[in-house]
Image (cartoon, rainbow, N blue to C red):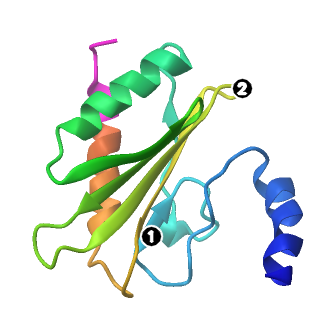
Amino acid sequence: MKLYIFCLPILFFIFGNNPLEPCPSSPNCISTVAEKKSKKLPPLKFKTDMKADKAAMKKIIATYPRTKLISERDDYLHFQFVTKLGKFTDDVEFYFDEENRLIHFRSASQKGWSDMGANRRRMKDISKEWNGYSEL
């Protein structure tokens, strides 16, 4: 517990207001804030404003089966995706960085070591949908 409390100011300094945790050493995580190239994808760009962009992202995620919104704040969305095979749960988080007009994300498996690229594929698909989304 003491180590965790000590790390919070350091993480805040490194990531600012971004609430996304760094990816673990396991290969089953992808993020816009990852340091390793193999775990990193570029952030998404705002299309209009945070409120409209959050609503648009919720619409995109709603098209995926076996998803559930877990929590929401003004600048944050947390979903869970359950895989069809094996019923594994993955956490997908979005941080809406209004100052830089970027949407950072993190997708990670809750358990296990490898996801056989499932989180990377999912976030590439969501990114592609976001970049082509015109209902704003």
In the rendered image, the quadrant that contains the N terminus is: bottom right
Disc 1 is placed on an element classified as: strand
Q: Mark 2 points at which residue?
A: 99
Q: Residue 29 carries which label?
A: 1
Q: Which mark is residue 5?
A: none
**Which quadrant of the figure has residue 5?**
bottom right
In the rendered image, the quadrant that contains the C terminus is: top left
Q: Within 10 Å of the Cα at label 2, are there few (<14), some (14-19), or many (20+) other Cα atoms?
A: few
Q: Within 10 Å of the Cα at label 1, are there few (<14), some (14-19), or many (20+) other Cα atoms?
A: many
Compared with 19, 43 (above or below) is above
Q: Position of residue 57 (x, y in %)?
A: 36, 31
Q: Position of residue 94 (x, y in %)?
A: 49, 44
Disc 2 is placed on an element classified as: loop
**Which quadrant of the figure has residue 127?**
top left
Q: Where is residue 124 in the image (x, y as percent from the top left)?
A: 32, 51
Residue depicted at x 51% and y 61%: 40
Q: In this view, does 23 lie to the left or right of 127?
A: right
The residue nearer to you, when weighing 130 against 82, is: 82
Residue depicted at x 27% and y 40%: 61
Q: Is residue 19 magenta?
A: no
Residue depicted at x 51% and y 29%: 45
Q: In this view, does 41 lie to the left or right of 14?
A: left
Which residues lie in the magenta part? Answer: 129-136
Residue contact between numbered discs 2 and 1, judged by CB atoms under 8 Å: no
Compared with 100, 34 (above or below) is below
Q: Does the magenta stretch include residue 134?
A: yes
Residue depicted at x 56% and y 78%: 24
Compared with 40, 70 (above or below) is above
User: Three-letter amino acid code at disc 1?
Assistant: Cys
Q: Is residue 103 left or right of residue 118?
A: right
Q: Position of residue 29 (x, y in %)?
A: 45, 70
The alpha-carbon separation of the residues under discs 2 and 1 comes to: 26 Å
